[in-house]
């Protein structure tokens, strides 16, 4: 799980997480708390963050959504500031997770079979995928969504629609399509609504048919802003988050009369229900 603030109004979900930088030599264990991009994290990874293109694209979406929600101009550098200082912050507006907890590509292009040899639940890879679908992982995703109730979940990759529906329990959700066409680039979005949350299944962030242009990314940000209010974004002062979203929202955290969601503690950590222990997919739930 890639982290951020699960109490944030906007969630992003991809098929697989960003490649790990830690060693895979040690036995796998659960990550029982989501990581937030706090000051220590940013200082440690400042030099490598400029290569994280997918996260930069998400920052561009969120910067456009914030500008539209707050009815103010969006400068050319706004998304860069959002990425450098605000994205996935402990009390930020967004949270990132993935359907499957292990990165598809290992560091150094190590083959999957070699990276996880000695762990029969993970080899072959299809066995691991099946365990996530039928074991604890997809159930875990559904439970945390029900607990935190984000306003929006933006899911990347239409080819994974069946897995998104399965993981979030959207079999009975109402569905319609929306054509995102900021210029001559039309993209079809599948919009699902269920239990106070809206899911938007959209093209991936890479590839010939993906959300690869700045125009499309900013249009996506403006589109999701219709579900957001200014209180969904932390107040800023000199580039710093000065008050938590919980403080900003007060008694009405959603800004629209909805019930209070659980808040993210000031420590930047939040206790989650322990992942299921019935299979490896539960043990690596994070």
Image (cartoon, rainbow, N blue to C red):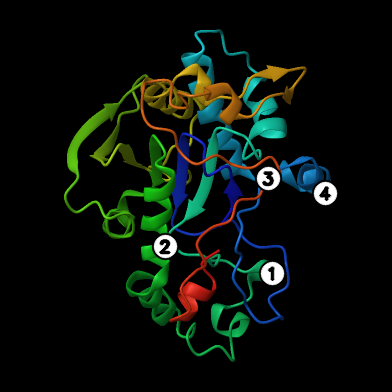
Residue 65 or residue 195, whichever sits in front = 195
Residue 207 is at least partly visible in this image: no
Q: Which mark is residue 123?
A: none
Q: Earlier in the sequence, mark 2 or mark 4?
A: 4
Q: How far apart are marks 1 and 2 (CA)?
A: 30 Å
Along the polypeptide, which appears first: circle 1 or circle 2?
1
Query: Which numbered disc, 4 or 3, marks the residue that appears first in the sequence?
Result: 4
Relative to 145, is 81 on the left or the right? Answer: right
**Which of label 1 and label 2 is nearer to you?**
2
Residue 48, image x and y in percent?
76, 48
Q: In this view, does 6 lie above or below 1?
A: above
Q: Are marks 4 and 3 in contact (CB under 8 Å)?
A: no
| Secondary structure type for disc 3 | loop
Contact (Cβ within 8 Å) of mark 1 with mark 4:
no
- Say which residue label 4 marks: 44
Q: Mark 3 points at which residue?
A: 268
What numbered label is drawn on residue 140? 2
Nearer-the-camera pick, 14 or 243 = 243
Q: Distance between the residues labelled 4 and 3?
A: 17 Å
The reply to whether callout 2 and callout 3 are in contact (CB within 8 Å) is no
Place residue 220 in its image quadrant. Answer: top left
- Which element carries disc 1, helix, strand or loop? helix
**Label 1 sits on residue:** 108
Cα separation, mark 1 vs mark 4, equals 20 Å
Identified at 55% across, 39% down, the residue is 263
């Amino acid at each position: 799980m890639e982290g951020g603030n699960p109490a944030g109004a906007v969630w992003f979900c991809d098929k697989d997480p960003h490649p790990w930088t830690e060693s895979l030599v040690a036995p796998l264990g659960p990550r029982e708390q989501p990581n937030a991009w706090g000051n220590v994290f940013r200082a440690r990874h400042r030099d490598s963050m400029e290569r994280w293109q997918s996260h930069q694209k998400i920052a561009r979406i969120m910067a456009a959504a914030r500008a539209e929600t707050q009815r103010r101009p969006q400068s050319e550098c706004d998304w860069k500031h959002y990425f450098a200082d605000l994205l996935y912050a402990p009390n930020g507006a967004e949270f990132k997770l993935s359907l499957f907890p292990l990165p598809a590509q290992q560091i150094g292009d190590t083959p999957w079979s070699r990276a996880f040899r000695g762990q029969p639940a993970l080899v072959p890879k299809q066995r691991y995928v099946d365990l996530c679908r039928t074991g604890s992982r997809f159930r875990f995703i559904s439970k945390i969504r029900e607990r935190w109730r984000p306003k929006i979940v933006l899911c990347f990759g239409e080819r994974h629609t069946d897995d998104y529906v399965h993981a979030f329990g959207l079999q009975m959700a109402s569905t319609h399509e929306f054509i995102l066409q900021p210029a001559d680039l039309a993209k079809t979005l599948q919009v699902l609504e269920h239990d106070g949350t809206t899911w938007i299944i959209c093209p991936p962030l890479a590839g010939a048919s993906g959300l690869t242009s700045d125009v499309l990314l900013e249009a996506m940000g403006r589109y999701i802003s219709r579900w957001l209010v200014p209180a969904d974004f932390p107040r800023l002062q000199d580039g710093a988050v000065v008050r938590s979203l919980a403080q900003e929202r007060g008694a009405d955290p959603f800004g629209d009369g909805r019930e209070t969601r659980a808040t993210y503690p000031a420590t930047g950590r939040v206790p989650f229900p322990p992942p299921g222990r019935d299979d490896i997919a539960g043990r690596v739930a994070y």
